[in-house]
Image (cartoon, rainbow, N blue to C red):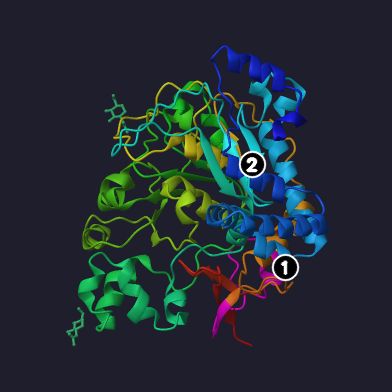
């Protein structure tokens, strides 16, 4: 249905006939029905048709009802929205689809010029859902180690969920602090032990002194970074594609560079740059903290551990000694759509940077194999899913992707939804998803738990105007994500007085 809108249908089908490409928008009969039911442009029309649809579904038996309910997960929510809000979601989705697939409107053979490099986005079952498809001639190289099945070429994402959650990240603190644990109800008994390796043996930190001792070396009193503290940040992944372009100088031009795990710098500076401000570590890398600390010659890199503090790490920090600051990350949860170190690094970057660019994360069309730019095991990757998710983030205006095929540093992102569209869609999404504080304009609306704390008046360590303005906006409050909280409520520590 959707493909009728752009001028490439015939050519696409011609290729299809030759067997090179298959229909990228295959949908089951049930899905097609839902699409017809939920896509009309006007709210009232939509509701009427939905009601009729529901009656039809009732009349045609249980299976129809199941298909119906399955297809309109957000329908009940959409009823809660005003027509302006529904339009905001529609407008986000329309702009988003253009942003991903724009080249198909211009010319079918110039895929390379698109943001999505041949990816196409289609509307899903409602105003929130989109499907991002790779061209059907994409050779899926990564295989699930358990099932041996190659990775699929089609991925579904919820734009409402993404826009509501990622915008919240920009105002959050993503480093675990003592301030957070103290303010969390039963923070020490219920939470602190979870951030300690084998914490289960600590009997919920019955001996708080012992718990504190274990966490002390990685637990700052208050957040070491505030939102918008840094200007331009680059997050560097470990993809072998990095060796195709000499991005080194460009990367060194950023205010902050964030790397991952055991990614080396020495011998690769031409491609990955020299600068390294932060390094995000998974469990395996964190256990080799001494080796990791050697990767950055300046020895000033700040190490952020995604998981738990381990006795081995404490020992190394004290005895080696490791002088780098080491912190634990406190992250929001994005569900199964977004796991892995790459996403966590973007989350960390977005929580303190004005703009975030990414290098070395993606596969361009025609990728041969998912490799690292240095040698290390390469299990546990879903490169196409990751690529599609990052494309979604780019077309929500959160990040900019650089890769061999998008090597021009001045590349302009076309069709990214405007700031006003994003703000309107975020507000609508918060309501739709019943997020804590939805519908309010209070900057602290999402604060589910509020604690007053004594704090030095000027907690902003940076002279950046954007950071200071933001602190004024939130009245000096620190907003922490509450992990696994379905309403995405936050824990807020409010300065006293
Ligand atoms: C985050 O803070 C900015 C001001 O710096 C504000 O405009 C924006 O609405 C806030 N976002 C959320 C999700 O609260
Ligand atoms: C609690 O832990 C501290 C530090 O390890 C230890 O010195 C103290 O004896 C412990 N207290 C109890 C009651 O076990
Ligand atoms: C860089 O190359 C030199 C010489 O081959 C080697 O000794 C060194 O270990 C390399 N460094 C890294 C981080 O791979």
Residue occupying image coordinates x 47% and y 81%: 183
Residue 445 in the image: above or below residue 127: below
Res. 80 mark = 1
Q: How would you rate the neighbour count of disc 1 (Cα within 10 Å): few for under 14, some for 14-19, many for 20 or more?
A: some
Asked which quadrant contains residue 412, the reply is top right
From the image, tell me which residue sits under label 2: 32
Disc 1 to disc 2, C-alpha distance: 25 Å
Question: Foreground residue, 315 or 227?
Answer: 227
Mark 2 residue element:
helix
359 within the magenta span = no
Image coords of residue 2 (percent x, y)? 71, 35
Image coords of residue 284 (percent x, y)? 28, 49
Question: Foreground residue, 180 or 219?
Answer: 180
Q: How would you rate the neighbour count of disc 2 (Cα within 10 Å): few for under 14, some for 14-19, many for 20 or more?
A: some
Image coords of residue 142 (percent x, y)? 38, 31
Mark 1 or mark 2: which is in front?
Answer: 2
Res. 168 mark = none
Asked which quadrant contains residue 415, the reply is top right
Question: Foreground residue, 403 or 255?
Answer: 403
Image coords of residue 311 (percent x, y)? 22, 63
- Image quarter where the C terminus lies is bottom right
Residue occupying image coordinates x 46% and y 76%: 179
* Segment tinted magenta in the rendering: 448-475
């Amino acid at each position: 249905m959707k493909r009728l809108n752009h001028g490439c249908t015939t050519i696409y089908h011609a290729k299809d006939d030759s067997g090179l490409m298959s229909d990228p928008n295959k949908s089951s009969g049930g899905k097609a029905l839902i699409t017809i039911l939920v896509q009309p442009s006007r709210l009232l029309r939509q509701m009427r048709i939905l009601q009729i649809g529901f009656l039809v579904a009732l009349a045609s038996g249980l299976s129809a009802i199941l298909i119906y309910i399955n297809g309109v997960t957000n329908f009940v929510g959409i009823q809660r929205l005003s027509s302006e809000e529904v339009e905001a979601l529609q407008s986000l989705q329309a702009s988003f689809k253009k942003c991903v697939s724009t080249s198909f409107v211009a010319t079918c053979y110039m895929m390379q010029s698109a943001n999505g490099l041949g990816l196409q986005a289609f509307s899903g079952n409602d105003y929130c859902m989109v499907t991002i498809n790779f061209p059907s001639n994409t050779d899926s190289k990564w295989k699930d180690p358990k099932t041996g099945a190659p990775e699929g070429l089609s991925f579904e994402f919820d734009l409402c969920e993404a826009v509501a959650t990622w915008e919240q990240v920009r105002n959050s603190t993503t480093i675990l602090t003592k301030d957070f644990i103290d303010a969390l109800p039963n923070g020490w008994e219920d939470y602190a032990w979870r951030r300690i390796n084998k914490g289960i043996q600590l009997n919920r930190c019955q001996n708080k002194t012992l718990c504190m001792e274990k966490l002390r070396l990685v637990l700052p009193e208050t957040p070491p970074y505030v939102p918008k503290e840094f200007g331009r940040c680059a997050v560097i992944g470990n993809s072998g594609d990095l060796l195709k372009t000499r991005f080194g100088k460009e990367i060194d031009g950023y205010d902050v560079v964030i790397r991952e795990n055991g990614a080396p710098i020495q011998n690769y500076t031409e491609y990955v740059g020299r600068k390294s401000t932060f390094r995000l570590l998974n469990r395996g890398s964190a256990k080799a903290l001494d080796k990791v600390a050697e990767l950055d010659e300046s020895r000033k890199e700040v190490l952020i551990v995604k998981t738990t503090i381990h006795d081995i790490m404490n020992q190394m920090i004290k005895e080696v000694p490791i002088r780098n600051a080491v912190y634990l990350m406190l992250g929001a949860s994005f569900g199964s759509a977004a796991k892995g170190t790459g996403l966590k690094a973007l989350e960390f970057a977005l929580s303190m940077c004005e703009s975030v660019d990414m290098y070395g994360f993606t596969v361009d069309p025609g990728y041969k194999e998912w490799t690292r730019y240095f040698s290390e095991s390469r299990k546990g990757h879903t490169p196409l899913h990751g690529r599609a998710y990052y494309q979604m983030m780019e077309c929500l205006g959160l990040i900019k992707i650089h890769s061999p095929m998008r090597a021009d540093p001045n590349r302009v992102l076309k069709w990214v939804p405007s700031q006003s569209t994003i703000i309107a869609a975020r507000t609508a999404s918060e309501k739709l998803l019943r997020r804590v504080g939805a519908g309010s304009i209070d900057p602290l609306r999402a604060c589910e738990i509020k604690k007053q704390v004594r704090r030095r008046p000027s907690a902003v360590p940076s002279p950046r105007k954007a950071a200071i303005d933001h602190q004024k906006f939130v009245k000096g409050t620190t907003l922490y994500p509450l992990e696994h909280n379905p309403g995405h409520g936050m824990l807020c520590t409010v300065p006293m007085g």
